[in-house]
Image (spheres, rainbow, N blue to C red):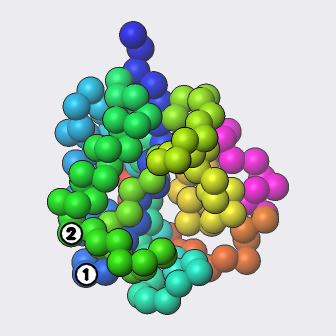
Amino acid sequence: MAAASAFVGLGGNLGDARAAVLWALAALDRLPGTRLVCSSSLYRSAPVEAGGPDYVNAVAKLATHLSPLDLLDGLQALELQAGRERPYVNAPRTLDLDVLLYADRALDLPRLKIPHPRMWQRAFVLQPLAEIEPGLVPASALESVSGQQITRCEQQGSAG
């Protein structure tokens, strides 16, 4: 069976968020049956619907043999390793990993919705996603989030 392409959003705003995102990018490549194909640059963005420090964000493209739910379980295990706590909705976090897209599948499960239900409203997802897979993000989607503050950091991702 061929590997599925999956896109994962990465972010954090507690502690050394840049180091946490870079650690997570390396850790994604070590998930069973999964290979990191490429990753975007790192971006800095203000929190959405919450307070706290700015976030560091990126998007990674994976080739995986894991099912969508097994991939989610792997991502949540990485969040725990990074010290993620969930005291309340939209709380600041050391690391947040979200399945954005998985092949061309659509899922609506209690634990996982694909495509990610809010990805089209967030510049910190769309801009890095457009960087590594421009054909996935319509210009109109980028225009719709153009008012959101997001800055590319100096560290570059790994083009695939």
Front residue of 100/138: it is 100
Circle 2 Cα neighbour tier, 10 Å, few/some/many (<14 / 14–19 / ≥20): few
Mark 1 element type: loop
Q: Are marks 1 and 2 in contact (CB under 8 Å)?
A: yes
Question: Is residue 98 placed above or below 133 in the rendered structure?
Answer: below
Q: In the figure, is residue 118 to the left or right of 44?
A: right
Question: Could you tell me residue 135's position as x and y percent?
Answer: 67, 39
Front residue of 96/159: it is 96
| Image quadrant assignment for residue 147 | bottom right
Q: Which residues are magenta?
A: 133-143
Which residue is drawn at the image coordinates 64% and 59% (left, top)? 118
**Which of the two discs, 1 and 2, labels the residue nearer the N terminus?**
1
Question: Could you tell me residue 66's position as x and y percent?
Answer: 35, 28
Which residue is drawn at the image coordinates 69% and 63% (left, top)? 121
Q: Which mark is residue 83?
A: 2
- Magenta segment's dominant SS is helix
Which residue is drawn at the image coordinates 30% and 33% (left, top)? 35
Tell me the CA gap for discs 1 and 2: 10 Å
Front residue of 50/33: it is 50
- Amino acid type at circle 2 is Gly
- Amino acid type at circle 1 is Gly
Q: Which mark is residue 15?
A: 1
